[in-house]
Amino acid sequence: MNSIRLASVAAGALMIAATGAQARDQVQIADSSTVLPYAKIVAENFPDFPTPVVDSGDSSAGLKEFCKGVGENTIDIANASRRIKAKEVEACKSNDLSEIQEIRIGYDGIVFASDINGPDFAFEPIDLYKALAAKVVVDDKLVDNPNKTWKDVNPAFPAWNISAYIPGEKHGTREVFEEKVLEAGCEAAGDLEARIASGMDKKAAGEDCMAVRKDGAAVDIDGDYTETLARIDANKQGIGVFGLSFYENNAGKLKVATMSGVTPTVESIAKGEYPVSRPLQFYVKKAHLGVIPGLKEYVEFFTSDQMIGPDSPLANYGLVLAPDAERDAVRKDFESGKTL
């Protein structure tokens, strides 16, 4: 098996060389809307090589592009606000891309914010579930969500019509939102148990908990956070879902909600106090290292403390830093060639 694996890696490198990868002198990156500002900062400061090409998009689309195989005509890196899924790894392998390196750069929080002049919101996951789930349990029956206003959800909230701008289904942020907010809220409400009692298996019940209403109260945003911000600017009673760093860089326009009594900050996420957070990472094709000029150096530059350490540009922009030992481990794993 080892000889077969080594032969596969060698074949991948030869394939790149044969297609004339040296003719491409720029690293090519597919981005996620959350990781995009960090990748741009690194790309713009990357020395000694042409500036990498960073294309905006979402995690799912970027990983789909990444998994098309190896060679000059394929990208080198996919940034993601969620970890790559097993089925995506298999899709990569089906296209002869079997050597993938995962590079964690830090952490981010998912925050809920409204117009700067609006009221304060103190959310629990159960509130977002009752507001945005397609179905909820009422009088022991699973019914289409009847809640029309935030006051219907929680009497402490204003009588605003429910209007939430959430990441589209292909965004990595959407998956975290579904699992850590909707499913958690469903369980807190007792509705997960009610679904199981009705005959659903646990997996189906969890998926049903995460289904979002389609009556206009929840609006999928397929673009980046600037589109969500524009929606709130147009609708002062809207609630938007953002990455922490985007919110912090637009704090003059937005008022952030607490979640489970915790205000989202770099400090509360780093300490593990804020409940809706996730790691950020990117994926590299090992077969492209040493073939695409500047790729290895770009990864080394990105993971250096100059970029992701204390007082670095990414930390100043809002990246929640990984602990020192974790950053060291990321660098060592990359240098050793560790793959998924």
Image: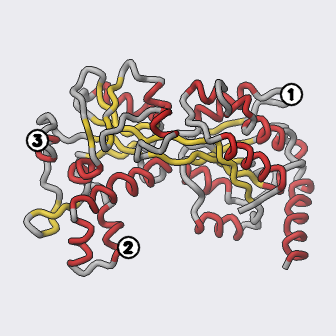
Pointer 1 or 2: first along the chain: 1
Q: CA distance from mark 2 to mark 3?
A: 32 Å
Residue at image location 60% in from the left, 29% down from the top: 315
**Residue type highlighted by circle 3:** Pro
Dot 3: element:
loop
| Lower sequence index among marks 2 and 3 | 3
- Which residue is denoted by mark 3 in the rendering? 155
Q: In the rendered image, which quarter is residue 136 located in?
A: bottom left
241 or 185: nearer the eye?
Answer: 185
Q: Nearer the viewer, residue 125 or 114?
A: 125
Name the mark nearer the viewer: 1 or 2: 2
Looking at the rendered structure, the kind of residue marked 2 is: Lys
Which SS class for mark 1?
loop
Q: Nearer the viewer, mark 3 or mark 1?
A: 3
In this picture, residue 190 sits left or right of residue 201: left
Query: In which quadrant of the rendered view does residue 120 lie?
Result: top left
Q: Residues within 10 Å of mark 1 (few under 14, many from 20)?
A: few
The residue that mark 2 highlights is: 203
145 vs 330, left or right, is left
Secondary structure, mark 2, is: helix
Residue at the spot x=72%, y=66% of the render?
A: 95
State left or right for residue 272 relative to residue 293.
left
* Nearest-to-viewer mark from 2 and 3: 3
Q: Position of residue 280 (x, y in %)?
A: 58, 45
Q: Position of residue 39 (x, y in %)?
A: 65, 35
Q: Quadrant of the N terminus?
A: bottom right
Q: Position of 56 compared to 221: left or right?
A: right
Q: Amino acid at mark 1?
A: Asp
